[in-house]
Amino acid sequence: MSELQDLVALIRAETPLLVIETPDEARVMALFRQSLMHAWRALWRWSVTEGLRRVDMDSEDDSTIAPDLSATLQDIRAASQRGIYVLLDATPYLGYASYQRALRDLIERRGCQPHVIVLAGARIELPAALEPFAVRFALQLPDPNALLKIVKEEATEYAKQNGGRRVEVDADAVRQIVRNLQGMSATDARRIARHLIWRDGALGPHDLPELARLKFDLLNKSGHLHYEYDTAHFSDVAGAARLKQWVEQRRLPFLQDPPPAGLEPPKGMLLLGVQGCGKSMVAKAVAGGFGVPLVRLDFGTLYDKYHGETEKNLREALASTEQLAPCVLWIDEIEKGLAVDAGNGDGGLSQRVLGYLLTWMAERKSRVFLVATANQVERLPAELLRKGRFDEIFFVDLPTPATRAAIFALHLDKRKIAREAIDLDTLAAAAEGFSGAEIEQAIVSALYAAYAAKTPLGTALLLQEIHTTRPLSVLMAEQVQALREWALPRTVPAE
């Protein structure tokens, strides 16, 4: 059934209390006006500034009833004609017993007509005394045709206000813009379309990153997600040839909607590895390889001292992520948020969070590719590692000699340092056991030393810094070796 048909059915059934959570008051009123063509009632709107006003005529009635809600509820009860009463600003009053009683009298039809009372607002939390009587009605989000119409209307408005100058339009980009606006309300979609058009008078591929940022800002009201503006490319990642090939094979099935016959969009990967070996860079490169936004979930901000709030925060964060699809969701050091409870007395909270995340991972249909990273595999729950939770589990090991040479070359090139006179193979051999992060820091330290000595950076200075550095594979040799012994026979090497 359509949105209008659902509403008409509720009105014909004389539903006593409807709750509509939306900031779009104009759309609510327009929908009720449409419903009167199929189920006629007198239509009234109440606000704290205008009072009660009848709005089902061709033009709104100028006569109003005083804006006091208590008096308004009494007038509704005394009305001789059944009607629909849309109360826009009633939420702040619902905590008072007198208003709850007045509403219950209307809901239970004590001495009054079978009115339909509608509470509309951006967020409506009902007291326990009223919740059992309420039917929550959700406005449907605009479909692609409606979104395209919104974009065209904003383009027309731009031309009107700019002396007939038409918006420069790339048809393929507009189709992608409409696809990325899906899941948003008409009001938010119009706001974004207007922003994209008015900033340069054009709609093209260059608007897609800005659209993703604007969409993220609108959806991430909880603050648990972080939009990563700087994604990477696989050319920025040394080594990991097997992982790169795996991602490339899945790029088109992930982006194509619907996916090719017989294939489902890939769901995600878990990256295990030694600290500093580039897992975070790989997560950014996956988003860059897919060409979609990268969103990072901060598990630390999810946890709340009040019962049920942590699970609610996770639900809201994942729902917001799904509305950003297609995108990559990055959970860094996932073991810190989902560590096995070893009697630390959290009342089962970590298990509830884990259970909801596992359910979402298994049942989601949206194109959200999950990249989780972990350093301490022994702290991960067994349920998370079971085959099928992730499409694949990769192990990012300490770099090989060839990869270490490539890492030196990448970081030297990044700093625009000529490397013709630098012996990369010698450096790679000397840096055995170094992670990518440790190689970068050796270069940084050598640059400081070269600057202080007022000499060019060369192989000798780099070797000196390498020889004075104790890498993590030495400092934490037992832990690193235990991780490698566990992961190598159980996971897929990224290299």
Image (tube, rainbow, N blue to C red):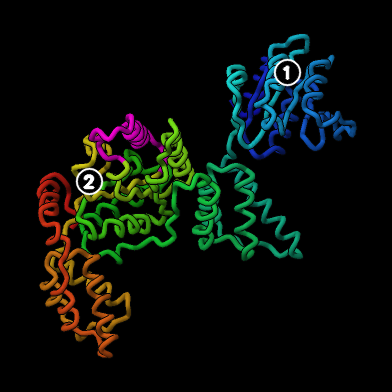
What is the span of residues highlighted in magenta in the rendered image?
338-367
In the image, 159 versus 118, the foreground residue is 118
Measured Cα–Cα span from mark 2 to mark 1: 59 Å
Amino acid at dot 1: Ala
What percent of the width, then of the height, locates residue 368? 39, 44
What percent of the width, then of the height, locates residue 288? 37, 59
What percent of the width, then of the height, locates residue 242? 20, 56
Where is the N terminus found, in terms of image quarters? top right
Residue 240: image quadrant is bottom left
Q: Is residue 121 magenta?
A: no
| Left or right position of 256 against 97 | left
What percent of the width, then of the height, locates residue 333? 29, 49
Looking at the rendered structure, the number of numbered marks drawn on it comes to: 2
Residue 40: image quadrant is top right
How many residues crowd mark 2 within 10 Å: few (<14), some (14–19), many (20+)?
A: many
Numbered disc in front, either 2 or 1: 1
Identify the disc placed on residue 186.
none
How many residues crowd mark 1 within 10 Å: few (<14), some (14–19), many (20+)?
A: some
Residue 260: image quadrant is top left
In the image, 448 versus 167, the foreground residue is 448
| Left or right position of 277 against 476 | right
**What residue did someone put label 1 on?**
102
